[in-house]
Image (cartoon, coloured by chain):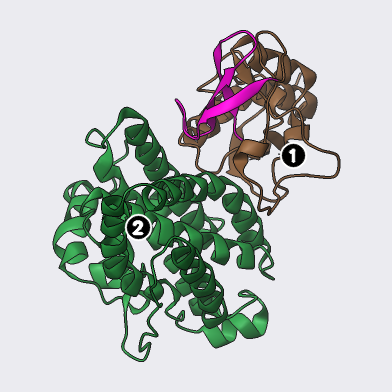
Amino acid sequence: MRDARRELLLALADDELVTGHRVSHWTGVAPSLEEDLAFSTIAQDEINHADVWYQVLVGEVDDVRAAVDALGLGRRPDEYRHAVLCEQEPGDFAYSLARHWLYDHADTIRLRSLGGSSDPDIAAVASKLVHEERYHVEHADLWFARLTARTDDARSRLAAAMEVALPQAVWLFEPIDGEDVLIETGVMPELSATLQDRWATQVTQALRDAGIAMDVPAPDFTTPGGRRGVHGPAFTDDVWPEMTGLYRAHPGAVW
Amino acid sequence: MTATTTIDVVAARRAAEAVPDPELPPVTLGMLGVIHDVIADGGHVHVDLLPTFAGCPATEMMTADVRDAVLAVDGVTGVDVRIRFSPAWTPDRMSPEGHEALRSFGIAAPVDVPAGRRLPVVNDEDTADDRRTCPYCASDRTERQSLFGPTPCRDIRFCQACRQPFEGFKA
């Protein structure tokens, strides 16, 4: 049970941490000042949300900060549990927006479900975060509407980005290791597969309404993915070394 | 005379509540309703904080400031400050002084929380439905201009009546 709960919390936290790092790419180089502010704020939000999930995982310890840093920055690449969607390079603005839209809708569905968790800490944090994530979803939806309503060029570039991002995003719903135990105890009120169906219905409907016909592929979850520590070079050779560099150079540093 | 181990819990709470918000100095944590339980155990004091915004990068600073403030209270030998999300912080925890202090800073607090709707809520409403009263002229003819503002917990609004931009406190 404790191991399964840890796997769930790491999946939640690592998704947010790695997303925050990739989103921060746009700080200083976004297409407009307002978008610079938006992506910089979202990056801060996500990294702080990761911090909160790590706090739930470490629980009552003497030095919470050291324990949280050890989790966030002190693990080997194959010990991270985020979905590979989160670690991909920002690509062009269309890909970043497609990922943002797919991820934040998935995150919201997951948090709403976890608001009913039998674990009081998980339920409380999920309920708090879903409220803050509204701003991210609304931002993503504004861009989705803007790009699909205007020119064919904007829509086709978003569609091309979705072709790449959608098959990656569905791996957000790769089952958690030990999910059967989490379901049995009510820590997860619903299966990942149930959340995936809800998300797939929502995104395919929105895409169809926008004139982009696309199906969500059904992945083979018997092959391990990000939730079981399998990551690509975008993480192992890029995000991970950069994100953990200072921590590895100065273990236990305080700043 | 012997050293006393009895702590004045009211004084400890008052010290914690007087700590200014690191990003909004005119507003104290007490005014915001961030200070939850203050419990004395011998010379040791436990303080629970309920952050208004989980994505707040200033919570660590608040924690340290509260620890220092309570440590300065007579008889306190140790303090631990914990961040709590249950019970959740809700806008109704803000005092009238807190609303006024935010307003004087050009920030509209979430005043118009409809009856029965308490955070955290899971809703399908746009954040744009969360309307604010202009902190300068009290008009309701305001609109939200940006979802993101100078800190993670604030957005940008505009008043059509007095033509002033202002900030909304996210909640």
Q: What number is the disc on residue B10?
A: none
Along the line of sight, which residue is nearer the eye, B40 or A5?
A: A5
Residue A79 covered by magenta stretch = no
Would residue A78 be found to the left or right of residue B138 on screen?
left
For numbered disc 1, what is the local secondary structure?
A: strand
Above or below, B121 against A76 in this view is above
Q: Mark 2 belongs to which amino acid?
A: Ala
Q: Is residue B126 left or right of residue A173?
A: right
* Amino acid type indicated by mark 1: Ile
What residue does disc 2 label?
A98
Q: Nearer the viewer, residue A87 or B134?
A: B134
Pinpoint residue A91: horizontal percent, then vertical percent. Answer: 20, 55
The answer to whether residue B42 of the structure is visible from this angle is no
Task: From the rendered image, report the letter of the chain displayed in green.
Answer: A
What are the residue bounds of the magenta stretch? B141-170
Q: Name the quadrant of the N terminus of chain A.
A: bottom right
Q: Chain of mark 2?
A: A
Give me the disc on residue B39: 1
Residue B6, image x, y percentages: 77, 30
Indicate the chain on which mark 1 is placed: B
Where is B143 relative to A156, above or below? above
Spatial separation of the CA atoms under disc 1 and disc 2: 48 Å
The x, y position of residue B11, in whole percent, is: 75, 22
Q: Where residue A146 appears, x then y in whole percent? A: 41, 45
